[in-house]
Image (spheres, rainbow, N blue to C red):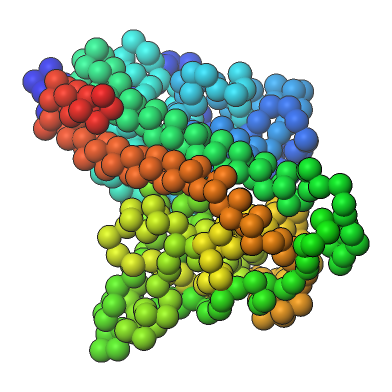
Amino acid sequence: MGVDWREATLLEVAVRQRGTVSGPFGSTISKRFFVAEGVPVIRGNNLSLGTDGPRFHDDDFVFLTTEKAEELSSADCRPGDLVFTARGTLGQVGLIPRKSRFPKYILSANQLRLRPDSTIADSLYLYYWFSAPAMVAVMQGRNAGSALPNMNLGALRGLPVVLPPLPEQRRIAAILGALDDKIDLNRQMNRTLEEMAQAIFKSWFIDFDGHTDLVDSELGPIPRGWSVEPLVVQMSRAIGGQWGESNPTQDCVKSVLCIRGTDIPPMRNGEACQPPTRFLSVRAMESRTLEAGDLVFEVSGGSPTQSTGRCLLVTEGMIAKYREPLSCSNFCRLIRPRSFAAGVFLFFFLDHLYRRGDFFALENGTTGIKNLPFTSFSNEYPLLKPPDAMLLRLADAVGPMLARRDAAGAESATLAALRDTLLPKLISGEVRVPEAEKAVQEHLG
């Protein structure tokens, strides 16, 4: 720690008036007050644990009317405020960006807020301080002891903070922020690339743009010469995933990265996702190691508002990003199409069914874990079967987009590793600003 750095508490860096507040009582902000649009409510899904995600997820909100938000104005949040989880996943932190989507937010009942004094502490520096692994562990250790992990306002106010001089705080924050800004830019670009690819698929295989000669089928009008065939006809084989063992055993000696349903969305977006390492038998690994063109299809899980059926298309770039072979959990199926081009088409078609909500009607076990009966689905559910030439055309059109996504994801993984290395060293003074700036410039150019 630098000689001119000092130790403080979170309360000391807050503004004097309402610098730290807790969310409203649950009965005053329950779901009966939620409306379709208005003032957004910050919940746990808008925060991240450590640096695993954006500094603030500025979407997926529930809303309050302006009148209700005014009633709860003591729990308002504005750009520059930090938000902490009070109940649930302790250690989650979010920083409301200066260019936020909304001018004002309201805390949920499960969150706490810090409004920093800008003459003492930089908001972005504080975000990185509280996102560091050591501070996440401290916050998780402040559990008040209830069945649901709970950190009260008093525990929040007593959290320790090390403060370099304000100009140095800003330089530290700028170094780490530059890396996260580039990661976020890659994340946004990858979302755009997927939207572009989906638009191409929809134009060619849902709207049939350019086709005027249509004939009736089980799916409705389709281009003449195309057909409708179930998945079992359009794939080479399918096999259930295997969860394996958490440690090597006499039979399970081969380590793999096991993709779960929860890993599918970040991996599709090229994000720095690390599936858990599991151990399989030699035979299981040989039959379940993923190859380019394979699909990972979720058959168990979901929720009342989310169906099963999330899907991941495995690419060469995705495989190259990981040092260990990829496999999938027992809640998923490995689908091996007849070709990479067939895999691209089936991925987009299955994703189209998922987005449209078709899988809800096929599920069983709607209380608790839901299951999609894969065998009956793959044998009976009608899927579009375009000519092979159209499959190749789609793969040629979206292939460069997938490659660009994978390259951006690999870059983001490198930048995230650098950020995670620099973060604890910068805030402890082990690495000083000029040295860190040089390392970041070498990566960002």
Q: Name the quadrant containing residue 64.
A: top right
Closer to the camera in the image, 45 or 343: 343
Image quadrant occupied by the N terminus: top left
Is residue 126 at least partly visible in the picture?
Answer: no
Q: Is 218 placed above or below 134 here?
A: below
Seen at 38% across and 30% down, the residue is: 182
Seen at 52% across and 58% down, the residue is: 313
Closer to the camera in the image, 401 or 26: 401
Closer to the camera in the image, 52 or 153: 52
Query: Where's residue 392, x and y in %?
Result: 58, 55
Q: Is 178 placed above or below 283 here?
A: above
Query: Where's residue 176, x and y in %?
Result: 29, 28
Left/right placement of residue 82 relative to residue 361 reads: left
Seen at 27% across and 85% down, the residue is: 249
Is residue 118 at least partly visible in the picture?
Answer: yes
Closer to the camera in the image, 124 or 298: 298
Seen at 37% across and 13% down, the residue is: 118
Image quadrant occupied by the C terminus: top left
Left/right placement of residue 51 relative to residue 19 reads: left
Query: How many numbered circles are shown?
Result: 0
Q: Name the quadrant containing residue 380.
A: bottom right
Left/right placement of residue 347 relative to residue 17 reads: right
Left/right placement of residue 430 relative to residue 328 reads: left
Q: Residue furthest top?
A: 119
Q: Residue furthest left?
A: 3
Q: Residue furthest bottom?
A: 250
Query: Where's residue 307, x and y in %?
Result: 68, 61
Query: Where's residue 390, x and y in %?
Result: 66, 55
